[in-house]
Amino acid sequence: MLALTVLVALPLLFIVLQAVFPQFSAGSLAGAFTSVPMLFADPQLLAMFGGTLQIAAGVALLSACIGLPLGVARGLFNLPLARLWDLLFLVPFLTPPYIAALSWMLVLQTNGYLAQLVGFDLNALLFSKSGIVLVMTLNIFPVVYFAVSRSLLASGQRLALVARVHGASPWRAFFHVTLPMLSPSLAAGMLLAFTLAIEEYGVPAALGSRSGVVMLTVGIEKKLADWPIDLPGASMLSLILIAIALSAWWLQGRLTGGRDVTSVTGKPAENSGATLGAMTLPVVAVMATVGFLAVGVPGLSMAVTGVMSTLSGGLSLNNATIAHYAALFAQQGDALSALGTSLSLALASALITGTVGLLAAWLVVVQRIRGRGVIDALSLMPAALPGIVVGVGLILLWNRSFWPVTPYNSWAILLLSYCCLLLPWPVRYVGSALRQLGGNLEPAARVHGASAMQALRFIVLPLVFPALLAAMLMVFAIASRELVTSLLLAPAGTQTVAVFIWRQFEQGSVGQGMAMATLTLVTGLALMLTALAIMQRSARR
């Protein structure tokens, strides 16, 4: 509760106070609710609200259409190069959404890379509502993929095999046994996809202006960036986002029926996947196609742009250069310092959110303590808060003279913002895994003399570790490229990778920005590979 209060409740409280009392930032509680009529008088409100719902619903549904079959293939079958697909689908989380949007612009726009290679462009598709949904989905669908695949890897196929023994066909066993067991994880993944879409700023900001699509996050940014700054208006729009996220949370509970699905009833055995047989090549081809669209195309666009002398020079060997990479190591250590800062903050965020998320989900799902609804709600709230609003909340909270010690204007404020924004990941993933464990394993350990913490350490943690590890890797990936709160909260003299890249784009150095993005992507992947190798070696011992 202390961690959730510091990370979530207090920043949220100060946002609400700013929305209710327009003069709160000046230390006055006068004029309560006077910003409400101004909010409804905004002619863009309905367009922002409708655009946010349409884009987010489209992203959630399309993410399910892509992530569910790919996750089932990974979790149920002996898929060739299985670990490679996991790493491949982690790459979108290492890529900042605004970088992905810019990469797709360079590929699909008029006179883009695709037009230079094959003679036609998809400019009309890219700058449309469908284009925004597609670009955002290719960045977000892995949340559904990992939720589904990790759930299947943790639960195994015992019940589906029992159904097969008793005469059920493979499809009947899947639809009547496996799919219902997946419902909590699938719903959690779709909820995360939806909430990630409603809080996304980079993609709609890059593509929405030319397609006529406006979202609440863009409206919030304008209220905070355009003079005069409208803190009450931005806070009111943030409350609307929270209401949308809570509605999605309620809908998730209705879709799953509020029921828990138990799939682990005793000592777990190693999950042996089924054989794909003749379907191996088609399934691998589908996985490779999705991976190429989600990772290959934007990755190649980044890499190519990073070695191009000028964009106007086009795809030509005469236009190739390594000057952008050389400049990264020649700017008095700014680039390498920014990379080290981002990776350190990302690692700390993964460890903190993993620990807090595990304990919160355990208290809510397993221990069922009094007040668990408050813990569950607080753990979801950050998913509905745009990064820029979290930053404003943290400023309003910690930039106060009455605090004897404050993290404001230090690297600690960045760590708080990352942990606040990314806490829902481990909470939801671990919570879904815990709901599949059933209620008999921990009580059995307690009956035989284990304490609650011993049962958590030796029974619960090993069983939910795949889901926890997947969530922590995603937290690491997202925190390493977080932009909005970094721009707002980074103290003087402290740069993160996202801030460095953003400033390069502002200065017109697109090639150098893409070079830094490529270097960060490669470094993040190398660190993840190293961490997974160490964990696998420890597990074999």
Image (cartoon, rainbow, N blue to C red):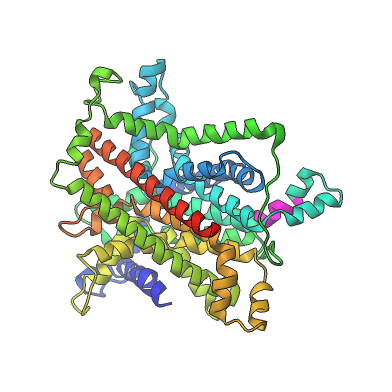
Dominant secondary structure (helix, strand or loop) of the stretch shown in magenta:
helix
* Residue drawn at the location 20% of the way across and 70% of the way down: 26
Vertical placement of 439 versus 138: above or below? below
Can the viewer see residue 508?
no
**Residue 232: x, y in percent?**
29, 62
Vertical placement of 182 versus 427: above or below? above
Q: Nearer the viewer, residue 360 or 307?
A: 307
Q: Is residue 138 magenta?
A: no
Residue lying at the far right of the rendered structure = 167
Q: Nearer the viewer, residue 227 or 165?
A: 165
Residue lying at the far left of the rendered structure = 332
* Residue drawn at the location 25% of the way across and 23% of the way down: 320
* Residue drawn at the location 22% of the way across and 48% of the way down: 336
In the picture, measured across the screen, residue 314 lies left or right of residue 409, that is right
Vertical placement of 184 versus 316: above or below? below
Residue lying at the far front of the rendered structure = 541
Can the viewer see residue 170?
yes
Q: Nearer the viewer, residue 31 or 429?
A: 429
Q: Nearer the viewer, residue 179 or 212?
A: 179
**Residue 132: x, y in percent?**
43, 38
Q: Specify the quadrant that holds the N terminus.
A: bottom left
**Residue 506: x, y in percent?**
20, 40
Q: Is residue 179 magenta?
A: yes
Q: How many marks?
A: 0
In the picture, measured across the screen, residue 519 lies left or right of residue 127, that is left
**Residue 145: x, y in percent?**
55, 47
* Residue drawn at the location 53% of the way across and 47% of the way down: 60
Bounds of the magenta segment? 176-182
